[in-house]
Image (cartoon, coloured by chain):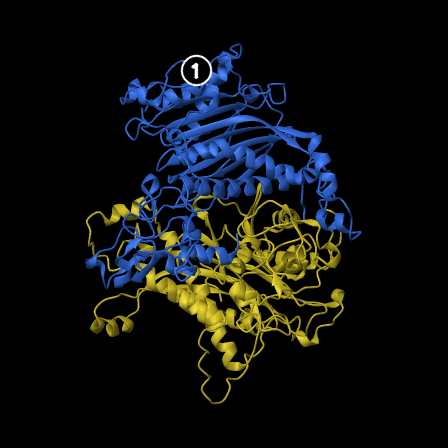
Chain colours: A yellow, B blue
Amino acid sequence: MSTGWFRRRFLPGGPLPAPRPPGPRASPVPYRRPRFLRGSGSSSGAADASRRPDARPVRSPARGRTLPWNAGYAEIINAEKSEFNEDQAACGKLCIRRCEFGAEEDQEWLTLCPEELLTGHYWALFDGHGGPAAAILAANTLHSCLRRQLEAVVEGVVATQPPMHLSGCCICPSDPQFVEEKGIRAEDLVIGALESAFQECDEVIGRELEASGQVGGCTALVAVSLQGKLYVANAGDSRAILVRKDEIRPLSSEFTPETERQRIQQLAFVYPELLAGEFTRLEFPRRLKGDDLGQKVLFRDHHMSGWSYKLVEKSDLKYPLIHGQGKQARLLGTLAVSRGLGDHQLRVLDTNIQLKPFLLSIPQVTVLDMDQLELQEDDVVVMATDGLWDVLSNEQVAWLVRSFLPRNREDPHRFLELAQMLIHSTQGKNDGPTGEELVSYDDVSVFVIPLHSQGQGNSGQ
Amino acid sequence: MSTGWFRRRFLPGGPLPAPRPPGPRASPVPYRRPRFLRGSGSSSGAADASRRPDARPVRSPARGRTLPWNAGYAEIINAEKSEFNEDQAACGKLCIRRCEFGAEEDQEWLTLCPEELLTGHYWALFDGHGGPAAAILAANTLHSCLRRQLEAVVEGVVATQPPMHLSGCCICPSDPQFVEEKGIRAEDLVIGALESAFQECDEVIGRELEASGQVGGCTALVAVSLQGKLYVANAGDSRAILVRKDEIRPLSSEFTPETERQRIQQLAFVYPELLAGEFTRLEFPRRLKGDDLGQKVLFRDHHMSGWSYKLVEKSDLKYPLIHGQGKQARLLGTLAVSRGLGDHQLRVLDTNIQLKPFLLSIPQVTVLDMDQLELQEDDVVVMATDGLWDVLSNEQVAWLVRSFLPRNREDPHRFLELAQMLIHSTQGKNDGPTGEELVSYDDVSVFVIPLHSQGQGNSGQ
């Protein structure tokens, strides 16, 4: 992505985009549930599901189908919003082959005998909005983007220390020392590959949706195991946590208009054209009105962590760039998340103001070094879309995990059953630790990934 | 600060700045040491100090002069660099008066009987570069800026909850609820006032230095006590830590080209004009050269936390925007810090490329709630310029604090002596916990602020 591209794409006065070549429009992305749910009998399709929350079926993989690491999965469709489940999921084995950068004449030979250099596993959740298409495309595509990005750097990933030059040749004798001083490790290449894969997938989704005339976007939460480490990459408001006997460790943080306020206000400060005179980039405790003119009211700008007072002028009465609190917070009155994939065509209702320049497709990546953890039998990672975390806290989820797993160690399906139980707990059907019964009316999808069994030959999907 | 201002000030093609009105140039900022050192006998002036590090005098306030909270202070001039000590310090009592925003006819009366509404204390360290002028101006000015900024919002600071409108009038009945939902507390107003004060002080320094034809900049580390809380605001590479019997808590983090890489690269991505075609914004493990052309080498761009490989092109051979590691890291080959005050005129040697657009004057503020701490007699905050932290780790400083204070509880000057001892430890004169003897050749200034005695009537300066 270059500055020039950004300016041409989003700012007025740039050259018009080339017209789409004439020809038939690509067919729309077909709706589907995750591949690994095939053959699961509980419900044949979302359209059959009753709209009453207490009657909605919870779906899980069929008992005979084992997911990577014997992970558990369960999902439920939203109660009211649409006939489609906008959440999607994917998981499987990642096979990274060697891809040498030799002379051109070598390359054909190399593709004839690809060598599997590294294997890992992959679990992903996508929470769609504006239709299911972007989440389906992400579930179909992101793992391929990641495999490609990892293959492009795999020589560095398997080296003791990533070489300065991917070819391995040493142009300057102290190159290893420079790399050492920067503290660059193999895991930094995996983080870089995840960052690039999210970007690449975002571009694919943009092209595919434009070609088929569809719209929409999705969040993405991905866990990848590689060489004894678990990488969690998050763009959006899903969440992953590690639950152990004595520890709850967040493995992701949420990206919303509230948590990314300063980044978003900063962009509007640099490029005020993006607001087209319709929005104010300043934050106030509520939307201002005529009576506030001439008063000094609480406000925050892009450079402020604290609050101050400003004299209200007419331009402060515009609709705020970020408005509302908590789950109600919206970017440009439109979107509840600030990172994710897709949304290339999304505009503020009845205007030409684009959301995309304010959205990031780059994930934040955290790394769990499993070799350092002395893992116990009931240690799991719980990954879920926001529908779960809206009604259950980290502590409540950990309480449910710790109540369920030790009592069910003999059950080979316990991680699947735990995933189902977590979903039921969002429907007011289980007694939680507090006795409160919050009900989620959103789509909810959950992976429970046991860490103790890692590498024990569950080959997955 | 508006976007328009930023574009006019820093980007080519904007209107030229108005010529300075003719007239005599203001006189240069006179060199001085902190006011509270007056009468301290150990050394009459920096120019007298020997250039050999083992002979340099450590200066502290005279024994009869008590600093706020009986804090200790000591400083030493650099060994080699200049005849001036580029560090500066200030401390004193902060008196915040009421400043009502009533009808104009009321205002004169109000200024006739200013009411002291809130008192606090203030300690500050400034580490200058490019001459002592900016640090001296900051030491003379920042506390006044802070007092002014706090007076502008003091009604909100003393309220149980800051009101939506500073006047206290309630335009919308649920205004208190909006403020509550945003979680806005009195301390957020103090944080906002610190942020604004740093900005205001930066502007003052820019004007004063331009008027007197001087140059330079400085870092700023400020501690402010107010209503049972200690606020630590930092812009630069000084550091404050809390040392208790069983705890070492960092109260600031350093802002350098390395720690702020992504922010700085992001600005160069948005405004490539700022690099004038002379620098590359990409980060490589070392500066690239001709032999690297056509190779795939390790790199990072603004959106990346991880590393990846890229094919080297000719433009990658330019000098890097951020270059070097650790203490050697430089912004545009020139500056070792990325936040601070001043530097309005600073340009890359022999070019017209300005440093200022990449520098932030905004501090990061952390808040220590002293009422929650159950403070013990030997609990202190140690604030020091980077000369100390270059040779002593947080753990080494804590070891020295914990070795010294319990043995000297009867000594009324123990915090002053601890500050002197910390300085001596940077000169290879004390046996530290490791026995290693690193020597600092930089200016070093230290405050030791005891927390247990807070509010016990030490009125200060």
Where is residue B142 drawn, in percent x and y?
52, 35
Q: What is the three-letter code of the residue carrying label 1? A: Ser
- In the rendered image, which residue does mark 1 sit on? B40
| Residue furthest bottom as drawn | A23
Q: Quadrant of residue A292?
A: bottom right
Q: Nearer the viewer, residue A448 or A253?
A: A253
**Which residue of the protein is positioned furthest toward the front in this rendering?**
B23
- Farthest top residue? B410
Residue at 47% across, 71% down: A9
Chain of the residue under label 1: B
Q: Please, what secondary structure does the residue beneath circle 1 have?
A: loop
User: In the picture provided, is B401 more to the left or to the right than A83?
Assistant: left
From the top left corner, tell me how far across and down residue A56 is, in percent. Answer: 71, 68
In the image, A446 versus B110, the foreground residue is B110
Q: Position of residue B321 (x, y in %)?
A: 34, 52
Q: Is residue B353 above or below residue B128?
A: below
Relative height, residue B354 to residue B391 (above, below): below
Q: Is residue B116 left or right of residue A148?
A: right
